[in-house]
Amino acid sequence: MADDTDDGPGDAPIELGDLSDLADGQIRCFEDIGPDGIVVCRAGGDLYALTDNCSHADTPLSEGRLRGFGLTCPLHGASFDVRDGSHSGPPAWEGVGCHTVTESDGVAVVVLAGSTGRDDGPVADGSRMQTR
Ligand code: FES
């Protein structure tokens, strides 16, 4: 019997644990979740999660800086809105995957979107530039 849960991101909730210590403006990397890992951010009091891979040239966004709702890539400075994964402009040509995070009873849970924002699926806008 085929197992259709091993082909990539799905809609199964994944526990992230207690993230109550993640203060506003802080980010945390979960490198084992999804093909590129995810970066979880707290902004405006809420948790957000993006695929941890810049759409421009494969750089972990978790090494970048969060200001307000914008997560800036450390390599060339593209900024991504943590609320929807959209990018603010060049050098990125498209957004990154945005995943739903909820907190309940001290436990954060993420549900991966169908796309990691890397090669397929819904992204904010624009066309993809192949950088590798
Ligand atoms: S690798 Fe992120 S902006 Fe270039």
Image (tube, grey):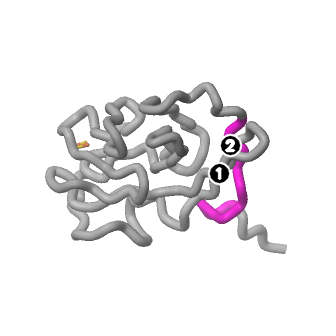
Give, as a three-letter code, the residue at label 2: Ala
Q: Label 1 belongs to which residue? A: 102
Location of residue 127 in the rendering, given as x and y in whole percent from the top left corner: 23, 69
Question: Residue tagged by mark 2?
Answer: 108
Instruction: Please give the range of residues in magenta.
Output: 6-17
Q: In this view, does 111 lie above or below 108?
A: below
- Residue 75: image quadrant is top left
Q: Where is residue 125 in the image (x, y as percent from the top left)?
A: 27, 70
Find residue 3 and report its image quarter: bottom right
Please check the rendered image and state whether residue 38 is part of the magenta-colored stretch, yes or no: no
Residue 31 vs residue 46, the one in the foreground: 46
Residue at (41, 59) in percent of width and height: 84
Neighbourhood count class around disc 2 (C-alpha, 10 Å): few under 14, some 14–19, many 20 upward? some
Q: Which mark is residue 64?
A: none
Q: Is mark 2 on a helix, strand or loop?
A: strand
- Pointer 2 and pointer 1: residues touching (CB < 8 Å)? yes
**The image quarter in which residue 22 lies:** top right
Q: Position of residue 2 (x, y in %)?
A: 78, 72
* Residue positioned 31% across, 50% down in the render: 80
Residue nearest the viewer, comparing 111 with 102: 102
Q: At numbered mark 1, what does the secondary structure look like: helix, strand or loop?
A: strand
